[in-house]
Every structure is written in structure tokens, then in C-alpha cells.
Amino acid sequence: MKSLFRYLDSVIKCSFDKEGTTRYKTGAVILTPAEELPKDSSCTIPDGMDRGRSLWDFVSVEETPDGFEICISLEEDQGVFGLGQGIGCLNKRGRIYEMYNTDEPDHAPSKTKLYSTLPVFYLISPRGCIGFFLDHAGYSRFDVGSENRELLRITIEGPGFDFYAIPGSPESILKSVLELTGSSLFLPIWALGFQQSRWSYPDEKTVLDIANKMRQKKIPCDVIYLDIDYMDDYKVFTWNEERFPTPRTLIDELKSMGLKVVTIIDPGVKAAEGYEVFEEGRQRSLFCKRVNGTEYRPAVWPGESRLPDFLNSKTREWWGSKYSQFIDVGVAGFWNDMNEPAIFYTPESLSSLFELAKGLEKDKGIDTEFLFGEIVAKKRYHDYGREFYQEDDFGTKHLHRNVRNVYGFNMARAAYEGIERSAPERRIFNITRSSYPGIQRYAILWTGDNESQWEQLLSEIRMVQSISLAGISFTGCDVGGFGGNCTGELLARWTQFGAFLPFFRNHSAIGTRDQEPWAFDEEIESIVRKTIEMRYSLLPYIYSENWRSTKGESVMIRPLVLLWPEDSDTYQADDQYMFGPSLLVAPVYSPNATGRHVYLPESNWLDLNSGEVLAKGHHWAIAPLDTIPLYLRENSMIITTKPLQHIESASWNNLRVKGFVKKSARFDLYEDDGITRSYERGVFSLKRIEVEKREDGIFIEILPSEGELRIEEREIIFEIFDGERTYSASVKDCPEGMALLIK
Ligand code: MIG
């Protein structure tokens, strides 16, 4: 085993490789640690709790026949947080997780793996913290104190891996992860609007009906989705001419109603003679192959298909250029699905199933019954990882299993880079289902096929937080649940949660009950409308925070444990989170509930529903169906506007600043045109708003704006509560700034 260690500020990078092997570098890390340490380095921790200690005092790495094993000893008071898209509590201690990207439509508690590999985890105790990132594109398994309570055992398959150890506070660990893997793409502002999807709105008329209904019913909405049925025979990059004969006209009409269209894109290319994408990919040898060089023939939606080999930059360039024809007809964004990649069956898997099926006999009773079960399970969980190879830019062939976890990452990257080439001045809206660290540079991550179940609503509240801990800020889930039939009550509660997610989209599966905001009854419709309006009113706050998340400092969804690691009560409080710096959100996730338990850390909070001030501690929040518990942190502010039916711009009128300020608070309000990249050339406005409690009143100052976007004089209403009374004033905000004392 060869090992190499490097320091990068406080990050220790450890590389391990088997002698004589070559492995694929994932492309997740963009920053190369410069200073090389001697081979026998003790890897002394430069910072934080374990300062001066060697990493090897509590971490060991050994070579095994299939790969490696890392053992990390856990201490009694440590929680293990993160590991990305997993099911279960935010504290992962006591469970097993696997990193092997999987199309898993059943997010049951027993499941150990889903669509993404995000192996970033934090050991947190009130004494201090250390974070880790395992950079490895192949299979790994994390036994987080399940077999042995005091041991985190990571089993790694493959020829080698990189491993980063990052001591520091959880917030500084997250910052280092963002430095290593890159900060978030800056999405167009409409990405923050409400979005409506369905598998599938089958034709142009249905799409227009949905759009008209949104407007008639005055439900704010910015995006409508076209799922797989817009395609001709599931052929990627085509339109079905019967059901979508005039996509450009459709898109123009929707545009005049303030709606954007996002289309799904699947990686499986139909193997059909004469179909351009197939012919080109084959001619240029861009599809995945078997070890003997023959074409790999998986079946997905279109039947027999080919999978582009995204490991290769030639394939990425070719694939990326395909998006331009959709951009040309006006498609505003792309939704890359099935990119684990999902495979329904292959000649190989079928023949092994047929082999098994030979044992089926009519009169064998229980044996036949078991065999049936086995065939079904084998069909679903067959591992395709050893059936084909991928070739990197250096001509090295990698067994798919060893590079699988970056397939989706590289598809999303191909899309991003292709869209950027064909529309360089516009901001990119790109979604992916499968991901790997660094994906935040290229795409939004949504959590895939959840179900309309209360348990899964809770599961998503936790999942988006562990995804955020991996440095992925722009995330969200299918609001209302994808599989199964939603109920009105569940939709109301899920929408309340969704309003505090960066990505806010209602989506549901084929064959399920309608799930649009009006699909239940009038009370539900009006709660959903009110909730979406609340989201739109918060856009000045959310957009500013989203902009900040692109600066590599933090993420929008912040678990309590990220901010208050010394307070071990936050370790369990994973059914609530901070949305940006000021708001604590505690969604209701139980049926028939009229309230829930909430933990408030740090100091005092203003209950935005009751107007009461609550002290640090455990509370019961009253929350009838139309209410989501929301708290404003002491010495912080939010900025709102009047909600519109769709987002028209990213600079605001009708601004209101609401603050809970006992000492002082500040907020940086960011504005720009919301869609282009002119902000990169300085065309934006950044205004610092400062509020200070003084003996004689509340002092407000708006500093002159940074950036070249000039926003003309406007009125901003301030409502500042100091714990005893509210100070209100309407102030004139002009480009040169202003100051005022409210008595
Ligand atoms: O095999 O395109 O997660 O959102 O509606 C299912 C149909 C394929 C899975 C996605 C889901 C989408 C569905 N897709």
C-alpha cells in the first residue's frame, strides 16, 4: 500500500493506493493541497479539539484483498452527522450506510443506500469536532457504531482513495468542504419560485390547463415540468409530435403567463437505427462497453438502450451540446433523471433470472414460493456494476462498479457545461437525481422518489439537512410525496416545509391521485396558497441568502448542530433547522397534529405566529393546520416583499424589514437582474442594513450600496421589536444610503 499525506491549511489529505494500480480521480476536489508531508508523517492535527494529536491515534487504515478498511474510534459523547442522502436521524451513529448510487423508489427505514454518494461526515461532541470526506468513486460501506458502538468502520472497495480530515468547528469544516469541492452555482431567481410537476402532463392542452388554473386560482407559480411523456418513444432530445406538436408555441404562451418550462432528460439512449443520438454516439464510440469491447445493452424506458460514458470528456462535450436544441425552442431548465444510472434489465441479468426461473415448479409448494421471491428481489437489486466498463481521458478502463458514484455527477456536469457553451450569458437551471460532492458547482439535487407518507415527510426534513452538511445548498424534495396517494392534510404540511427549502416543487408519480394545490378541498387550497404566498413574500431574504451560499461560506439549510455543537440538545433536534441566519423552522410532520415540540437553542426567539418571546429551551408550539412554527432569532432580521403571481425581478419594491433586536443586527440585501451573469461584472446591489438598539430608541442605517446596479429611491418599512415594544417607521432608501433614529 502506498500512502501520501499533504496539508492544506488545517485540512489533512491522505491518499492510499494499492501497489501497481491506477484509479480514477473523481474531479470532486478542485483545490490541490500543496505542501507535501514526508511519507512517515504522523499527520498531526493542527487545529481544534485534537490539536497536537496524531490522526493515527484514533484512525487506522489497512489494506484488504478487495480494497481497504478505515477504522475510526468513537467516543461516548460524539455524534456522527452527515453522510449525505441517507435515511434516518441526522446523527448516524448506530446504523449502517452504503455508498453505491442506487435508483431506490422505496425509501423505507431499512434502506441503506439511495441515489447519491456524499461521504462527508462530522464527529461532533461538546468538546470539539472533526470532519472527514472520503473521496472515492467506488463502493464503500459505513458501519457507524452499529456492530461495535465505539467504532466507525469504513469498508472500501477498489484500488485506492483519498481521505480528508478536517479539524475545526462544524461551520469551519463545512467551509473547508466548500473550499475543496467548490461553491454552489448561482441559479436564476425563478429557481426559488414554486414549481409544479407531474409524471406526466401528457400533452400541450393539459399543460396549458394547469397553467391557467394556477393563474385563475391565484397560486403563485414559476415553473411547469415536462416528464418523460413529452418525448417521442422515450427517445432523449426528441418531442412527441402528436402530443407536443408545437413546443415553441406552447413555451411562448406559458412565458406570456410568467411560467418557465423544465424538461426531463434521461441518460438511456434508445438503440434505434436512424435515431441521431444513437447513431452519433455509436459512430464516435461514446457509449459504455463490456470488457471485450462490445456494446453494453441495458434496457430502460425506451427498451434496449445505450449509456453514454460520461467518464470521458469527449462524451460529455457531445452530450452537453445536445441541450442547445431545447434551449433554442425556449426550454428554461433541465432535470437530469435516472443517472445512477438506473437500469431495468440487461441480457446478462435476464439470463441469470431465466436460469433461476428454471427451478420454478408447480408442485414444490414453499420452495417455489421462496424462489419467486428471490427472482423478484434479484430483478430489483441485481448489481450491474461488474457488467461494463468506462474509459477515462487517459484511455484507462475502469470497472463501472469502481467509478459508478460519479456517473450522475458527470452527466450533470456535461449538461451544465453544454448549456453554458450554448447560452453563456444566462444562469443555468440544472437538476440531478444522482450526485457526488462537488455537484453543487453544476446542479440542484432533489431527493428522488419519496412517498406520500407522514414518515417520509420527517425523513425528508432530516435528509435535506445531511445533504446540506455535504456542502450542497440548493436541495429539496418532491412536495406532497412522489409515490402513493397524498391527502389534503399531508399536502398542506408538506407545502409548509417546502416553502422553507431552496428547491420547492410539487411532484407526483404516474397512477397516483392528483396533487396540485387545488386537488383536495377549498380549505387545503387556501392553506397551500397562503403558504406559497408566504414563500414569495420572503424572497428578498431567501434570494440574498442564496446569493451568499454561492460564496462558499455556508449553505441555506443549517442543522442546529452545525451552529451550536457545544449544546448537545441540538444533536437530537433534527426535525427542525435554520433557514438562513435568522429563521428557525419547525415543520409539523404528524397527522391530526395541533402542535409539536420545538427546541430553541442559544438565547431568545420571537415566535412569529404568536408574537411571544421564548427563552432557550424546550417548548410546545401550537400549530393548527394553517400554521408552521417559525421563530426569529434574537438580534436578527428578515426582509419581505409583497407576493406576486410569479417572480418578475430580483430587485424589490414594497420592502419590509422585520427584526428582533435587543442589541444589534445586520442584514446584507442582495439584488440584481435575477437571470443573467451581469452580476459577475459588478451589476448588482449589495446593501448592508444595520439596526442598533440604543438608549433613546432604535437606530437604523442603510449603507451606500456596493455594486453598480442603481436602485432608485424607494420606501422600506421597518418593524423592529426589542423584546418590549415594536418600533415602526417608513424610511426612504436611496443609493447613497440613509440613517435614522426611531424613538
Ligand atoms: O423510473 O420520469 O425520480 O421524478 O417522475 C421512474 C418518471 C423515472 C423517476 C424520477 C421521477 C420521475 C420518473 N422517473
Image: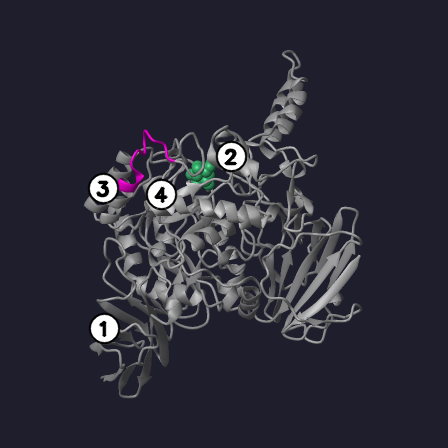
How far is mark 2 from mark 4, CA to CA?
25 Å
Quarter in which the N terminus is drawn: bottom right
**Residue 75 position within the rendered picture, expressed as x and y whole percent measured from the top left:** 68, 63
Q: Amino acid at mark 1?
A: Ile
Quadrant where ligand 1 appears? top left
Crowd band around label 1 with a 10 angstrom C-alpha radius: few (<14), some (14–19), many (20+): many
* Nearest to N terminus: mark 1 or mark 4: 4
Reading the image, the residue beneath label 4 is: 225
**How much space separates mark 1 and mark 4, taking CA atoms?**
36 Å
Q: Which residues are magenta?
A: 239-249
The residues bearing labels 2 and 1 have C-alpha atoms spaced at a distance of 57 Å
Q: Where residue 377 sits in the image (x, y, percent)?
A: 60, 30
The amino acid on which the numbered mark 4 sits, given as a three-letter code, is Tyr
Between 97 and 349, the residue placed more toward the observer is: 349
Kindly report which numbered mark, 2 or 4, lies closer to the viewer in this rendering: 2
Please, which residue is most extreme toward the front here? 283
Asked if the stretch drawn in magenta spans residue 245, the answer is: yes
Residue 636: x %, y % from top left: 37, 73
Whether ligand 1 has any atom under 8 Å from the Cβ at mark 4 is answered as no
Q: CA distance from mark 3 to mark 1?
A: 33 Å
Assess whether mark 4 and mark 1 are in contact (beta carbons under 8 angstroms).
Answer: no
Q: Is residue 308 left or right of residue 14?
A: left
As drawn, the label of residue 716 is: 1
Q: Which residue is mark 2?
A: 278
Q: Compare residues 654 and 307 and report the one nearer the observer.
A: 307
Q: Are marks 2 and 1 in contact (CB under 8 Å)?
A: no
Which residue is painted at 31% across and 52% down in the image? 624
Can residue 87 be seen at all in this image of the molecule? no
